[in-house]
Amino acid sequence: MTIIPFERNVEFFWSDGLQSQRLLRVVCVLALAGFFSATQQAHAQWQIERSATTASLRGIHAVSANIAWASGADGTVLRTLDGGQSWRSCSVPAGAEKLDFRSVWAWDGDHAMVMSSGPGTESRLYSTHDGCRTWSLVLTNPDADGFWDGLQFDGTRFGVILGDPIRGSFTMFVTYDGGSQWTRQNNACLRTMEPKQGAFAASNQSLAIVPIQDTNSSRGTGGNRQIWFGVSGGWLYGFELTPLKLIAATNGDSTENGCIHAQPLPLGAKESAGIFAVAFHDDTYGLAVGGDYAQPRNGTTTAAFTADGIHWHVAFHPPAGYRSTVAWNPTDATWIAAGPTGSDISRDNGNTWQPLDHGSWNAISLPFAVGPDGRIARLVSWGQMHVMNQAPIAAVPASAKE
């Protein structure tokens, strides 16, 4: 919110001449400030939709303003083809009735993947090619002590699965064919910086993929990707895939073997505190949000931002509490963060935040947000009834159409 400075030594009494004019100017400025504050507060609002489920929802992916998929506890998968006017329950994959689908990714109304998070073999990846009438099991966690936290694609056929550490290194599987084949990654960039570190499966946003655009190639076809993920303790891990290259780092960030390890949100060693969501709206501007889910109303150290894709800074005025999800709103050029105590909006690339609502939310993929008890809403921007769209760059992978 823009703060309008006021003259401190204004004399508040009625009189003729200069003093009354000064008072009138102050009253007008106050009125204008209130007006602009009200209009800014109304710039966006959440419109609650009927989900036809009471399951806790943590996965949401908007393919477009009309097509979106949501997922959650007890094998729940939902789909809308009409912008959220109606959400339909999908069939449950065989044997997945008790799984918690924390992640969902879709290419259109027919092709999608859902990933469950849980210990050992309760972490699984399923795919559908027929609008969720049937499902195929693609991959099961091979680590008995493992736990998968997130599934992301970059808008092409490249995707990543992130999991908690096994033998001192975070787990990562990569696909280059749209999800049919996955290869385990083994490199020093995944080595943990602290004992007992872990990622969070709160919103499917602990992981972010940032395509590095080749000036000689069309959009979305560049071969290199920056991988960023946030973990407990407020640490961020960053590196570049294909090939692995150094992301330059200074100001105390630790680099080793072409990796970056930074701690923009120093939150201590508590397992309940850290970075829960990372997002970029281009290859330089990014946000990391989190906090301590055991103290959801504590707004201290809950957001950090980067303006160059390298250096991270703690927000001057952070969100009002722990936040598990964050997304860029291109329609209004704003960031929106959300968590169990509400949502916040930033108009200066994440440095200052102001409240948007006080609802309970788990995850965002604009224009939609999901939360506990089947809660789904659509963001409606001020002055328009249709809103932004974070659709993938490319259409459904060729392999998924087969």
Image (spheres, rainbow, N blue to C red):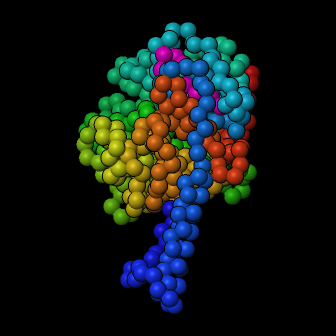
Instruction: Give whichever of 137, 306 is nearer the camera.
Output: 306
Instruction: Give whichever of 270, 309 is nearer the camera.
Output: 270
Q: Position of residue 393 (x, y in %)?
A: 69, 43
Q: Is residue 250 left or right of residue 390?
A: left
Q: Position of residue 202 (x, y in %)?
A: 43, 33
Q: Quadrant of residue 133?
A: top right
Count numbered badges in the picture: 0
Q: Is 69 one of the magenta-colored residues? A: yes
Residue visible at 30% across and 40% down in the picture: 295
Residue visible at 45% across and 60% down in the picture: 352
Q: Position of residue 87 (x, y in %)?
A: 65, 24
Question: Can see residue 348?
Answer: no
Q: Is residue 267 left or right of residue 57?
A: left
Residue range highlighted in magenta: 68-76
Please, is residue 31 above or below residue 131 in the view? below
Please, is residue 10 above or below residue 173 in the view? below
Q: Position of residue 231 (x, y in %)?
A: 37, 41
Quarter of the image where the C terminus is located: top right
Instruction: Give whichever of 77, 359 is nearer the camera.
Output: 359
